[in-house]
Image (cartoon, rainbow, N blue to C red):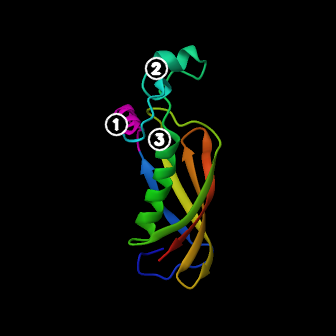
């Protein structure tokens, strides 16, 4: 789908790829989100809780990846509504890809199925979004 085409049901949105989830970004987002949870900051805490051996990305960052995908696919759009379900964690160093598919078009209102996938583990967040273009 090109940015000048009118979206159609079934159109696949261009993927938004995060080559490597950054622990530095997690630290910065902890400040922005006022979320000092140590699972985002300290590998030893993650290990002690039995949650693996890498820092865990904040959920709002994972949602932001999907929002970024929508904003790139539809420049100048406004997200009218969005919901998603967390299915698994995203860890530092993961390669994550946000993608979507148009499910309905009514005037300037476009609805999409959206998801975030991690290489080797599949879908870690999935939901729907309605945007105004």
Q: Does residue 15 appear in this view?
A: no
Q: Position of residue 10 (x, y in %)?
A: 62, 73
Residue nearest the viewer, comparing 52 with 79: 79
Q: Position of residue 130 (x, y in %)?
A: 57, 69
Residue bearing mark 2 = 43
* SS label for mark 2: helix
Residue nearest the viewer, comparing 19 with 102: 102
Residue bearing mark 3 = 95
Instruction: Give the foreground label among 3 and 2.
Output: 2
**Whether residue 80 is situated above or below residue 8 in the rendered picture:** above
**Whether residue 38 is situated above or below residue 132 in the rendered picture:** above
| Whole-number angstrom distance, CA of label 3 to CA of label 2 | 18 Å
Q: Mark 1, residues whose alpha carbon is within 10 Å: few (<14), some, or many (≥20)?
A: few
Q: Could you tell me which residue is drawn at 51 percent across and 50 percent down?
A: 63
Instruction: Specify start and end residues of the magenta stretch as a single range.
Output: 19-31
Residue nearest the viewer, comparing 52 with 46: 46
Q: Position of residue 124 (x, y in %)?
A: 60, 43
């Amino acid at each position: 789908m090109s940015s000048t085409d009118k979206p159609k049901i079934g159109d696949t949105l261009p993927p938004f790829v995060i080559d490597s989830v950054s622990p530095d970004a997690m630290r910065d987002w902890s400040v922005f989100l006022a979320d000092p949870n140590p699972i985002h900051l300290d590998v030893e805490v993650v290990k002690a809780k039995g949650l693996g051996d890498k820092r865990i990305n904040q959920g709002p960052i994972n949602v932001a990846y999907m929002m970024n995908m929508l904003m790139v696919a539809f420049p100048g759009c406004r997200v009218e509504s969005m919901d998603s379900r967390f299915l698994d964690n995203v860890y530092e160093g993961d390669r994550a890809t946000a993608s979507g598919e148009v499910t309905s078009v009514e005037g300037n209102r476009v609805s999409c199925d959206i998801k975030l996938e991690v290489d080797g583990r599949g879908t870690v967040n999935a939901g729907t979004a309605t945007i105004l273009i």
